[in-house]
Amino acid sequence: MELIKIEGLSPQEYEHPFDKKALNALEKTPGLDLLVRKFYELSTEKLMRLEFTGSNLKITPSSFPDVYEILEDACENLNLKTTPEFYLRYDDYFRTLGFTTNNLQGITVGVTNPLVAISVECIERFSRPELLFIIGCEIGRIKSQHVLYEDIARLIPVLSGAITAATFGFAGFSVSIMSGLDLALTQWLRMADYTADRAGLLACQDVNAAMMAMAKIAGLPKKYFNSFNIDDFITQAREFEGFADNLHNKFLKGISLMYRDQAFTIARANELLKWIDSGSYQSVLERKTRIQAPQAPKFCRHCGSELQPSNLFCPSCGNKVMPV
Ligand SMILES: [Zn+2]
């Protein structure tokens, strides 16, 4: 089946409403602006890149041609003009750093020069369409400019240690500000996954492959890969009642922090199926949702520095970039 290259696709056409809602809440959280400024001051992105590129194999068209081709397909289908750098990450290293909840998911690091990485297990366990879903999720994160807050979310546990906090000039952050930020970021990360899943599906354009990938993330044992009835998983996901509507329930928010390492795959599959059932997925493929993306400003209105279209915040002064 020939896949559709979704011409002119803008993330606003498929972003999940809970993602936007949680992002609004996050951006109103005290301390976030300071944290963003620190992120730029400390050249955190550069450090993360070094950490990453210093220990992982690069996936190139000559080293892993079949895998690299999937990345290219994901970018083309989702209308991302620049192909990000691509890496193969090994075992649990990044998981222990809190980079990802699950070894069967991709990760994306870096705002100005994003790089995408998948694990060895991803290559070994996913079929081509499933891998296209997984990589498509990451391309979706780049398109929606999720990566800055994701990188910052990864920093929080590091900064919570008193000594590191003092070293990096975070001593002024009270415990309550830090935990407020942690909570808002964790909430948003979960909702951002809903958007990423939609991008993954738009990349692979195969509902069963998306569901099978999710079943594998949810822990499907390898020996059942060929015999597993995907309809059972779809039924289970449909029956899941969902808790996303309780976004403002403080108790549930608190509980969700305790389970931050879970991938919540059934909840994600449930949200993705609802989107498909509503007809919205088909409308995007048929280009009925086409909208004009807001124009990114060329210069920062605070300090006049030149901006890249991907800048969510000015890399020079750390102020938020407003679309014109
Ligand atoms: Zn600026």
Image (cartoon, rainbow, N blue to C red):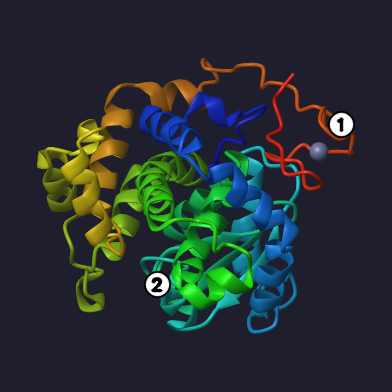
Mark 1 Cα-neighbour bin, 10 Å: few <14, some 14–19, many ≥20 = some
Q: Does residue 98 appear to the left or right of 63 in the view shown?
A: left
Task: Kindly identify which residue carries mark 2.
Answer: 103
Residue at point 61%, 47% (across, down): 34
- Total of numbered circles in the picture? 2
Report x, y in % for residue 317: 78, 44
Location of residue 126 (image quadrant):
bottom left
Distance from the alpha carbon under mark 2 to that under mark 1 = 39 Å
Q: Does residue 106 appear anywhere in the picture?
A: no
How far from the left and from the top, in percent, is residue 243?
18, 39
Element type at mark 1: loop
Residue at left offset 70%, top offset 26%: 322
In the picture, which quadrant includes the C terminus? Answer: top right
Badge 2: how crowded within 10 Å, few (<14), some, or many (20+)?
Answer: many
Q: Nearer the viewer, residue 111 or 304?
A: 304
For badge 2, the amino acid type reads Asn
In the rendered structure, which disc, 2 or 1, sits on the residue that comes first in sequence? 2
Residue on which disc 1 sits: 299
Q: Please tell me which residue lies in front, 240 or 290.
A: 240
Q: Amino acid at mark 1?
A: Phe
Assign a secondary structure to mark 2. Answer: loop
Taking the image as shown, residue 241 lies to the left or right of residue 10, namely left
Reply above or below: 150 against 296.
below
At 52% from the left and 54% from the top, the residue drawn is: 150
Residue 29: x and y, percent?
45, 38
